[in-house]
Amino acid sequence: MSAVTTHVLDAARGAPAAGVALRLEAAKGPNWTALAEGRTDDDGRIKDLGPDRLEAGDYRLTFETGEYFDRLGVATFYPQVQITFRIADPAQHYHVPLLLSPFAYSTYRGS
């Protein structure tokens, strides 16, 4: 399993957000290096994003939410959502869910 997984839920529709493009990046000094890209499945999940293990450090997930809402014909205030997080223990799994609506979003560290 990937060291980082995610699950995107569309709170406005009450359903998983399928087909959301996203990428995983690692901080390398002041720059970011792409590690992986993918799209959420029909259940709004991506389970095979990136390597099985990541070193301690800062990472970010960038979700292309504007593209997702455009496909639905819904206007959105957030065309992109970036979640930056820190991996402290490389032996752990990190699940980073995104709860999404056209005009708000939230996240938390899942399990």
Image (cartoon, rainbow, N blue to C red):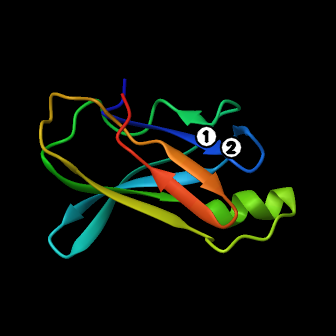
Residue 48, compared with residue 86, is above or below; it is: above
Estimate the x, y position of residue 39 in percent, counting from the top left.
60, 44
Would you call the spot at circle 2 few (<14 residues within 10 Å), some (14-19), or many (20 or more)?
A: many
Q: How many marks?
A: 2
Residue 33, compared with residue 40, is above or below; it is: below
Q: Amino acid at mark 2?
A: Ala
Q: Quadrant of the C terminus?
A: top left
Q: Separation of disc 2 and disc 1 at Cα?
A: 7 Å
Residue 37 or 44: which is nearer the viewer? 44
Residue 80 or 33: which is nearer the viewer? 80
- Tell me: 51 left or right of 12: left
- Tell me: 27 left or right of 21: left
Which residue is painted at 14% across and 71% down in the image? 29
Which residue is painted at 74% across and 51% down in the image? 12
Marks 2 and 1 in Cβ contact (< 8 Å): yes
- Displayed quadrant of residue 84: bottom left
- Displayed quadrant of residue 43: top right
Residue highlighted by disc 1: 40
Estimate the x, y position of residue 108 in percent, counting from the top left.
39, 45
Which residue is painted at 62% across and 42% down in the image? 9
As helix, strand or loop, the secondary structure at mark 1 comes to loop
- Displayed quadrant of residue 66: bottom right
As helix, strand or loop, the secondary structure at mark 2 comes to loop
Residue 64, compared with residue 13, is above or below; it is: below
Q: Quadrant of the N terminus?
A: top left
Residue 18: image tag? none
Residue highlighted by disc 2: 17
Q: Amino acid at mark 1?
A: Thr
- Tell me: 103 left or right of 109: right
Residue 56 or 9: which is nearer the viewer? 9
Would you call the spot at circle 1 few (<14 residues within 10 Å), some (14-19), or many (20 or more)?
A: many
